Image (cartoon, helix red, strand yellow):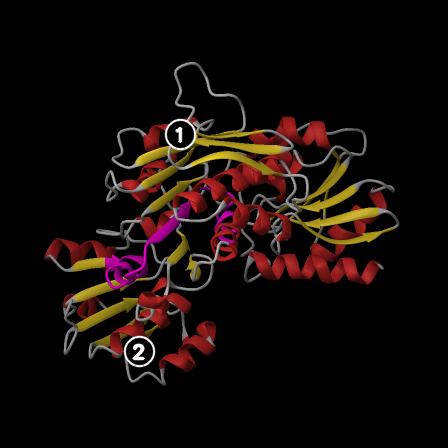
Amino acid sequence: MEFVRKHVVVVGLARSGMAVARFLKSRGARVTLTDQATEEILGPFAAEARQLDVTLELGRHRSATFQAADLIVISPGVPHTIAPLEEARTRGTQVIGEVELAARYIQAPIVAVSGTNGKTTTTELLGNMLAASGLKVFVGGNIGNPLIEIADRSADLDIIVAEISSFQLDTIATFRPHVAVLLNISPDHLDRYPDLAAYAASKRRLFENQTSEDFAVCNGNDPLVRQQCGGIQSRKFYFFARPPESGQPGQGAIITPKQVALSVPGLVEGRIDLEHSHLLGPHNRENIAAASLAALAAGATMDGVQKALDSFQALSHRLEPVGTVNDITFVNDSKATNVDAVMRALECFSSPVVLIMGGRNKGYDFGALQQHVQKHVKKLIVIGEASDEILAAIGRMPAQGAVKAADMAQAVEQAFMAAQAGETILLSPACASFDMFGSYAERGDKFRQLVGGLS
C-alpha cells in the first residue's frame, strides 16, 4: 500500500492511534488525528501528537475531514458504526482498524487469541510457551502493545502472538492468523452490539480468512464457539473441560483437574501436568489447554510448554492474590467486567467468599449470577452506578445479606469486618470501572492499596 502524500485520517488518540500515526508518517502520509475527547482529557497523548507534525482535531469529528480522506484507520475503542465512518464507507472510502493495517505489513506468522474471558492470560502464557521452546516471539495486540509497532521488524521474529478483541475483528479485511484461538463466548459489550448473536458473529471473523493450511483452536464445550467454528476452512482442534458428547470430534485436548491430555494425530500425543501451575480455577485449565494446543500448532515443544506453564504467574487484576490479613485472603479480579467472568471466579473457591461487585453496567442481566452468589457468597457488597440494579437482580441473600458501599474504601472496610479466618474477600465487579475509575487497572490498584493499609 502506497502512502506518500495520501491523506489518512486516524480516529482515536490512545496508544494504538499514536502508533498508527507514527507508522504512517514514516511512510510519507499526510495524517490527521481526530478524537472526540478534548485535549485536557487526552493529556499526554495530545502532547505527544503535537510532536508528530500531524493535523490534530480534538473535541469533535469534522465531516469535512472524513470526506477528504484517502484512507481511514480507527482505534479499537472507536465504534466502527459512528456516522462519519458509515458515511465514508458509503462514499467508497476504505475504513480499517490498526490490526488490519499492521497485518498487511507483518511477515511472521500470527497466532491470534480471542474470546470473552481469558484472552490476556492465554495470550501471555502462549507467548511464554513459544519462547521457552526457543522461538523469537512478540506478544501484543489488544494486550497493550499495538501490532503496528512490530510491522517494520517482524522479519526478525519467528512468530507473533496477539490478543484480538471483537472490536478489532470488526474492522479487519484480510487479517489471517496462522493459528486462531476462540476461548469462549458469553454476553459482553451489549452496550455496543445489538445482541449476543451480533457479538458472536464478530468473534467468528477471526477465522474468515484462514485456509486449510491454518489451525483453529476452539472450546468444544461452548455451544456458541462450536457454532462459530462450524464450516471454517482451517484444521480444527478442540479442548474439552467435560468429555466430548457422542459424535463430537475428539481431536485436541481433554482437561482434568490434574492434567491436560493432548491427542492430535501427526502433531502431538502427550500430557501437560497441572500440578505446579499457579493459575486458579477450572477456567484457567481451559486457558492452559487452549494455549498448549495453539503453541504446539505454532511450533512449540512439549518441554517448552510444560516449563512455561510451571513458571507462569497469575497476571495483575485477574484472580490476583494481593494479600492475607488475619488469615483472610484478598483477591483482585478487577478485570472481571462481565457476568460470566464473575461466575468463573466464584467457582475457584471452596471456602466462603465476601464479594465486592459493581461499577457501570455494560448491558448485563445480573440475575444470571443469583445461583452462584447464593452458593459461594456469604456477603455481597455493591458499589457504583449499578448497585441498585445488582441488588434487585440477585435477590435473596444468605443471613448476612447484601449492602451498598459509597466507595472502594468503604467496601473493603465492610468486607474485612464480615470475613473470618480462612475465607476470601474477592473484588470481581461484573461491570466496567468508568463510573468511579479511569480503568479496571486503576480500580484493582486502589483495592490492592487499601488491602495493604490493613496489614
Residue type at mark 1 is Leu
Tell me which segment is drawn in magenta.
Answer: 96-124
Instruction: Give the image location of residue 81, x and y in percent.
Output: 28, 51
Image quadrant in which you'd find residue 156: bottom left
At a point 33% along the width and 40% down the height, the residue shown is: 215
Instruction: Give the image location of residue 378, x and y in percent.
Output: 77, 34
Image quadrant in which you'd find residue 230: top left
Q: Is residue 303 left or right of residue 229?
A: right
Q: Nearer the viewer, residue 347 or 274?
A: 274
Residue 413 in sight in this render? yes
Residue type at mark 2 is Leu
Instruction: Give the image location of residue 340, x and y in percent.
Output: 54, 36
Image quadrant in which you'd find residue 214: top left
At a point 58% along the width and 59% down the height, the residue shown is: 441
Q: Nearer the viewer, residue 369 or 147?
A: 147
At a point 33% along the width and 65% down the height, the residue shown is: 154
Instruction: Give the image location of residue 293, x and y in percent.
Output: 45, 40
Q: What residue sits right under mark 2 in the picture?
A: 56
The span from disc 1 to disc 2 (Cα, nearest Å) is 42 Å
Residue 29, compared with residue 336, is above or below; it is: below
